[in-house]
Image: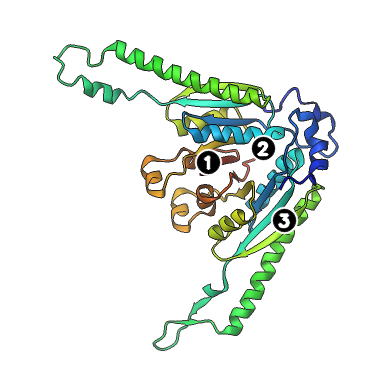
Amino acid sequence: MEEKGAAEAAAMSGGEAGAEASAGMKVAVAVDASEESLHALAWALDNIVVRRGVSSLVIVHAQPGADHYVYPVAAHGIAIAYAPAAAIESMRKAQDEISRKVVSRALDACKQREASVNATGAILEGDAKEAICQAVEEMHADLLVLGSRGLGKIKRAFLGSVSDYLVHHACCPVLVVKPSKAHDK
Amino acid sequence: MASPAPAPAQQQQQRGEPKPQKVMVAVDESECSHYALEWALRSLAPVIAPPLLVLTVQPLLPIGYVSAASFGAPLGMPVVAPELIKSMQERQQQLSKALIDKAKEICAQHGVSVEAMIEVGDPKEMICEAAEESKVDLLIVGSHSRGPVQRLFLGSVSNYCMHHSKCPVLVVKKQD
């Protein structure tokens, strides 16, 4: 994992910091369609990728599994019907499309900053928190970066919070970036 | 303001080259917070604008327990011997100082200058307050990795900080 690939990026920005950027770091950034996650990605790019250099950056996006697609049908007797196979297929395609857009938007953000980093995207399926947790473990990430919607306590309890789960279960340090409230430095 | 003074990197302002961040690490006597400090020094040294702020929060003295110990003292006597309180306070201060010294040592090993802060009060609230007052750009805390039930009852400093701090929070869990 000690790739020297990021040495160029590290040298141009990390050299003057005194401490040499040692072994390359693998950073995973979880994105979804929200602006907050893009903001988190931007923060990570500016402060970690450019300043310190990473050996690889992986954009992960979790899309819900296809078996969640049931819909209530107002038919006699049966209140819920499982979606027919064709509908599932087309929903899955739509989901894939959305996921691809989300990941490519994130990868574009990486390119814009001209961060000379090896950025790849990964689309995971299933429950977001568990899928991301597992992916981070499998890829041996050194750091996971998340955005946070800043939900209040109650919403967080009902809707569940991906960032809460990951902070406590991920196998690596987790950086949670909140949307900035325009606090200038 | 939060901009670091000495960093010479600011001269290459090609496209708004991102500047080093003002970072605060909260430590207490737990191993996991020192692990968090070491991780930060190892992995994020170029990101940190010197000096690194290291904060430890002394919990308020549990005066309630101390009072209970003198239950049954005759009326009119001071409920808690002032010497006892004083010695407890001194002990707390010694502990905090020892923590700060240990943190300074770790930072010195990595060649990072450090500024120490000691606050008194409820740890989670004081950490967030101090981070806000010092206008830090990044707050780093350790995490005990307690189970969900314990976390619910004992509370979690890292959880609180994550929800209430205005700046990004990095939670470093010590891996077994």
Q: Secondary structure at mark 3?
A: helix
In x, y percent, where is residue A93?
Answer: 66, 75
Q: Are marks 2 and 3 in contact (CB under 8 Å)?
A: no
Please give the residue where the numbered disc 2 appears in the rendered image: B43
Tell me which chain the residue with mark 1 is part of.
B
Asked if residue A179 lies left or right of residue B157, the reply is right
- Residue type, label 2: Ser
Left or right: residue A111 versus residue B143 is right
Closer mark to the observer between disc 3 and disc 1: 1
Residues at marks 3 and 1, CA–CA distance in whole angstroms: 30 Å
Relative to B44, say whether A101 is above or below.
below
Please give left or right for residue B159 compared with residue A108 in the image. left
Residue B115 place in picture, x, y as percent: 61, 21
Q: Which residue, given by chain and number where applicable, does mark 1 sit on?
A: B174
Q: Residue at x 52, y 33 (%)?
A: B33
Query: In what element is the residue under mark 2?
Result: helix
Residue that label 3 marks: A106
- Judge by depth and name the residue closer to the eye, B132 or A66: A66
Identify the chain of the residue marked 2, using the numbered disc in the image: B
